[in-house]
């Protein structure tokens, strides 16, 4: 069957990777996000109670990257249903404005509300 897709599919784990802000090593990727925290999907369990300095690198215009730096505390960590994966819940210590903007942009992007035209 021929593919009639008109909109390119975006693989979100490729775009929503979370890095350790100090070492710049990847920690995992975002499973879900809110203004208060996030779910991190990783290959290793996270230390419950630990405070982590995190960075999200968002691709921008003309090849530039935007960094969103924040700190978050791990509240829980458990093995995912996918073998070799772990889910960990984080509560943000303080959310910078860029993080709030990202959450709102994702909420808008994934909403199924019809766009109202003013024509």
Image: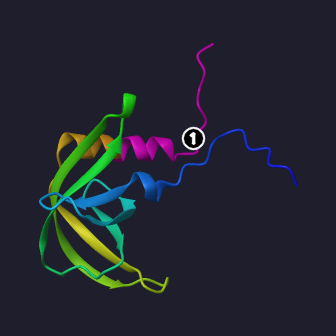
Residue 12 spot, x, y in % from top left:
47, 54
Q: In the displayed image of the protein, which residue is found farthest to the right? A: 1
Residue 64 spot, x, y in % from top left:
31, 34
Nearer to the camera, 70 or 109: 70
Q: Which quadrant would the C terminus be assigned to in this image? A: top right
**Rendered view: 25 above or below 66:** below
Which span is picked out in magenta?
103-119
Q: In the displayed image of the protein, which residue is found farthest to the top? A: 119
Q: Residues within 10 Å of mark 1 (few under 14, many from 20)?
A: few
- Disc 1 is placed on an element classified as loop
Residue 11 spot, x, y in % from top left:
52, 54
Hey, which quadrant is residue 7 in on the image?
A: top right
Q: Residue at x 49, y 42 (%)?
A: 109
Nearer to the camera, 46 or 21: 21
Q: Is residue 109 left or right of residue 28?
A: right
**Rendered view: 68 above or below 52:** above
Residue 117: say if magenta: yes
Q: Is residue 22 left or right of residue 34?
A: left
Q: Which quadrant would the N terminus be assigned to in this image? A: bottom right
Q: Residue at x 23, y 79 (%)?
A: 46
**Rendered view: 80 above or below 107:** below
Which residue is denoted by mark 1 in the rendering? Answer: 113
Hey, which quadrant is residue 87 in on the image?
A: bottom left
Q: Residue at x 17, y 45 (%)?
A: 96
């Amino acid at each position: 069957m021929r593919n009639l897709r008109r909109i390119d599919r975006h693989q979100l784990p490729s775009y929503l990777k979370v890095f350790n802000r100090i070492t710049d090593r990847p920690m995992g990727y975002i499973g879900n996000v809110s203004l208060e925290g996030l779910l991190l999907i990783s290959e290793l369990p996270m230390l419950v109670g630990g405070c982590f300095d995190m960075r999200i690198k968002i691709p921008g215009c003309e090849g530039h990257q935007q960094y969103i730096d924040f700190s978050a505390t791990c509240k829980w960590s458990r093995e995912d249903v996918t073998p070799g994966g772990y889910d960990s819940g984080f509560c943000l210590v303080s959310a910078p404005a860029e993080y709030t903007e990202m959450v709102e942009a994702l909420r808008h992007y994934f909403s199924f509300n019809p766009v109202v035209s003013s024509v």
